[in-house]
Image (spheres, rainbow, N blue to C red):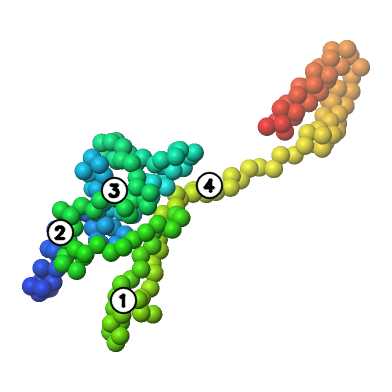
Amino acid sequence: MQIPRQEVPGELQKKLSVASQPECSICYNTYDNVFKTPKQLECTHTFCLECLSRLMVVTLNDQEGSSSTRLSCPFCRHPTMLPEDGPPALATSQEVLCKLPSHQQHEEPVWLEGEKLCYKSSRQDAISGAPDSPTGFCICIDIGASKSVDPPVQTRPRRSVFFTLPKVFSYVMIRMFSFCSSPSPCYVLLCLLYFYTAMAAARCFYSN
């Protein structure tokens, strides 16, 4: 008989904390202060920065040639005019940000580079204490629209009817002379009918 392991108070509190964190309604990931920063549209609906950036890429492909980009809210379809710097420049929902753990309540700078979202770590060097020290690093994620590659369709190689009909013709002629050796006109007519029917069937089969 196995005795269930009792939860350590610290672990239980951590699980409850994660479960109570707000999450994006598109990707269902919990918000943070980097790529999952809660961004607010004009309709006041909130989604994470990454999802809105991916939505922007799809919208740009659909609105090719347009001078401005408008994002339609996935919930109410209300359009929001995007700033020049894209979704990272949208207003951050402070209401959602305040519900995050204390170490995630300070928004980190994230910017667009083409079809990538980039973030530079501001972690300070333990020795020098300089935020721009070599220990800092840059993280980028691709937000480009995924291109589905259809698998190649395997088809049966089509043989030319000009190469197959001579074989059919030889077969039909052999069958005709083996069964229609009598000089009777009825037999000749039946042989010709058999011949043309077989040729038509062969042409139809090999042309498909």
Tell me which label, 2 or 3, sits earlier in the chain.
3
Q: In this rendering, would 18 be left or right of 145?
A: left
Crowd rating for badge 3 (residues with CA inside 10 Å; few <14, some 14–19, many 20+): few
Tell me which label, 4 or 3, sits earlier in the chain.
3
Which of 100/151 is in front?
Answer: 100
Q: The C terminus is located in which quarter?
A: top right
* Residue type indicated by callout 1: Pro
Tell me which label, 2 or 1, sits earlier in the chain.
2
Can residue 144 be seen from the camera position used here?
A: yes
* Residue type indicated by callout 3: Ile
The residue pinned by badge 4 equals 150
Gap between marks 4 and 2 measured at Cα: 44 Å
* Mark toward the viewer: 2 or 1: 1
* Mark toward the viewer: 1 or 4: 1
* Mark toward the viewer: 2 or 3: 2
Gap between marks 4 and 3 measured at Cα: 26 Å
Tell me which label, 3 or 1, sits earlier in the chain.
3
Tags 2 and 1 in contact by the CB under 8 Å rule? no
Q: Is residue 99 above or below residue 145?
A: below
Residue 127, percent across and down? Answer: 29, 87
Residue 186, percent across and down? Answer: 84, 12
Q: Which element type, helix, strand or loop, lies under badge 2?
A: loop
Q: Which element type, helix, strand or loop, lies under badge 1?
A: loop
> Furthest residue to the top?
185
The residue pinned by badge 1 equals 131
Gap between marks 2 and 3 measured at Cα: 20 Å
Q: Which element type, helix, strand or loop, lies under badge 4?
A: loop
